[in-house]
Amino acid sequence: MQLVPVLETRRLVLTILPGSAASRLLTFAIENDAHLARWEPPHPDGFFTEGFWRRRLDRSREELARGESLRFTIAHRDAPDGPVLGHCNFNQIVRGAFQACYLGYSIDHRWQGKGVMFEALERAIEFIFGPMRLHRIMANYIPTNERSGRLLRRLGFSVEGYARDYLYIHDGWRDHIMTSLTNPNPTAPAAGG
C-alpha cells in the first residue's frame, strides 16, 4: 500500500485528505465556484455535495495506490485542519518510456496573488521529480489566463504548442497553450515500467 505523502513548505502543507475531510473540500468548491468557473470544465452531478467529495478523496487514495495520480489538497501549515487553500493535481501518470503526468491546480480567491500556488507547486514538483521519479510534467492553460501562464513560466515550464478547441471549459471549446517541465536530474525508467 502506497503511503500518502505529506509535504511541507514554509507556510503550507500538501497531502491527500481523508474522506472525513469532505466538508472542507465542499466548502472550497462552493466558496470558489464563481472564481474558478471560467477555467474549469462543467461540474459533474453531485459536485456540490459532501458525498461527492468523500468519494473523490477515497478515489484519490485508490489512484495513488495504483500509481495513476497524486491529488494534493493545500492547507495552511499553522492550520492543517483549517480551510482548504487550493489543490494541485498530478493526473494521468504514465510510466514506461514516457514517465510523465498532467498538472492541474486551483487556488482560493482570497489567496490568489500571494505566492501560495508557486510555493505549493515548487514543493510538489520537487516530489514528483524526486521520490516519484517522473521525467515530464505537462500543464496546459487557456491563453486568456495570464496569471496561470506567468505562474508556469516562473516555475520553468516551456511553451510547446497551441492546441485549438482543446478542452470543453465553462461553456465552450477552448484553445490552450501547451507547456511542459522536464526533470533537471533525469534518470532512466526502471526496467519494465
Image: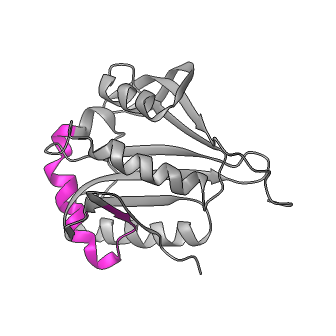
**Residue 63 falls in image quadrant:** bottom right
Residue 102 within the segment the image draws in magenta:
no
Task: Locate residue 121 relative to residue 38 in the image: left or right.
Answer: right
151 or 168, which lies in front? 151
Task: Locate residue 39 relative to residue 112 in the image: left or right.
Answer: right
Query: Quick one: which residue is furthest to the right in this view?
Result: 191
Residue 26 within the segment the image draws in magenta:
yes
- The image shows residue 37 at horizontal and vertical percentages of 25, 38
Q: Quadrant of the N terminus?
A: bottom right
171 or 40, which lies in front? 40
Task: Locate residue 74 relative to residue 92 in the image: left or right.
Answer: left
**Residue 180 falls in image quadrant:** top right
- The image shows residue 110 at horizontal and vertical percentages of 13, 45
37 or 97, which lies in front? 97
The residue shown at (18%, 38%) is 35
179 or 166, which lies in front? 179
The segment highlighted magenta reads: 13-35
- The image shows residue 70 at horizontal and vertical percentages of 50, 60
Query: Quick one: which residue is furthest to the front in this view?
Result: 10
What secondary structure is the stretch in magenta mostly built from? helix
The residue shown at (80%, 51%) is 188
Count up the numbered dots: 0
The residue shown at (39%, 51%) is 88
Display colour scheme: one colour
Image height check: is 126 above or below 83?
above
Task: Locate residue 147 relative to residue 111 in the image: left or right.
Answer: right
The residue shown at (36%, 39%) is 41
Q: Quadrant of the C terminus?
A: bottom right
Image height check: is 127 above or below 174?
below
